[in-house]
Amino acid sequence: MGLIARGLEARGLPTLNMSVLWEATQDFKPPRTCFLDFPLGCPAGKPHQPDQQRAIIRAALELAPSFAEDNWQIKTLPFTWSSDGSRQWETEICNLYRGGGLDTLLAHREAHREQGDSLVGREKEFVIKCNC
């Protein structure tokens, strides 16, 4: 995404990136990036937690004007994956990739059954309104 952002910026379209990979972001140097120390695939928060996702997106958008225009930057957002600040999620992600994800799937099956995996019919839950 960083290369796409640089291309868009070169054509005059401002961008704002969300990243969970600090090193990759440093390598590709997108113009403006908000970093979250979250697992891969979750650059806007935990699944099925729209309040947290909205808070993260709002925080990123509030930071956007503070980026320097002439230089790429990474700014860290003040959110943690676990409420107690633990990094247990790293072990879960490692196990997910090592074991093909079956243990994680089984552990979260009930939540997926209750909440569903699709946004179809739930689109209004994720609306962010502009106060322009």
Image: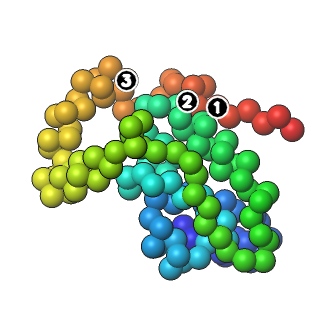
Q: Amino acid at mark 2?
A: Asp
Could you tell me which residue is drawn at 54 percent across and 67 percent down?
Answer: 1
Could you tell me which residue is drawn at 23 percent across and 48 percent down?
Answer: 92
Q: Amino acid at mark 3?
A: Gln
Q: Which mark is residue 100?
A: none
Q: CA distance from mark 1 to mark 3?
A: 18 Å
Q: Position of residue 45 (x, y in %)?
A: 48, 43
Could you tell me which residue is drawn at 19 percent across and 33 percent down?
Answer: 107
- Report which residue position mark 1 lands on: 127
Which element type, helix, strand or loop, lies under badge 3? helix
Q: How many residues crowd around disc 3 within 10 Å: few (fewer than 14), some, or many (20 or more)?
A: few
Residues at circles 1 and 3 in contact by the CB criterion of under 8 Å: no
Q: Quadrant of residue 66?
A: bottom right
Q: How many residues crowd around disc 2 within 10 Å: few (fewer than 14), some, or many (20 or more)?
A: few
- Report which residue position mark 3 lands on: 115
Frontmost residue, 74 versus 101: 74
- Report which residue position mark 2 lands on: 51
Sequence-wise first label, 1 or 3? 3
Frontmost residue, 93 versus 81: 81
Q: How many residues crowd around disc 1 within 10 Å: few (fewer than 14), some, or many (20 or more)?
A: few
